[in-house]
Amino acid sequence: MIAAGKLIKGQKSIKVTEVPKLLQAALDAMMSRGGASLGDKTVLDSISEMIVLMDKAQTNDVVTARITLLWKEFLDA
């Protein structure tokens, strides 16, 4: 998440539609540092799915609904 934080340093707020870019930066950094890959059944898979869903969303309401659904599925797994 440090990588994501570097992208928004100095900003007081962000739009929900900017979150995929931030999550991708965090994901890339975690994979590079930790050596895990997508498909290894780690938190990286969940983050990757969030990025995909959020990229498809066009509004904050859609993003919120998709994130809520994803987290419910994650918690029920």
Image (spheres, rainbow, N blue to C red):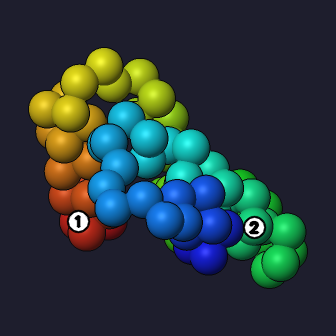
Task: Give the image location of residue 35, x and y in percent.
Answer: 85, 74
- Residue 15 drawn above or below residue 6: above
The residue identified by callout 1 is 76
Side of 28 where 32 appears, left or right: right
Residue found 16% across the figure and 39% down from its top: 65
Query: Based on the displayed image, in which of its 4 quarters is residue 26 positioned?
Result: bottom right
Q: Mark 2 packing: few (<14 Cα in 10 Å), some, or many (20+)?
A: some
Tell me if I can see residue 62 in this picture.
Answer: yes
Task: Give the image location of residue 45, x and y in percent.
Answer: 57, 57
Residue found 23% across the figure and 65% down from its top: 76
Residue found 75% across the figure and 67% down from its top: 29
Hey, what amino acid is under mark 1?
Answer: Asp
Hey, what amino acid is under mark 2?
Answer: Ala
How many numbered circles are shown?
A: 2
The residue identified by callout 2 is 29
Tell me if I can see residue 45 in this picture.
Answer: no
Q: Which of 42 and 2 is in front in this view?
A: 2
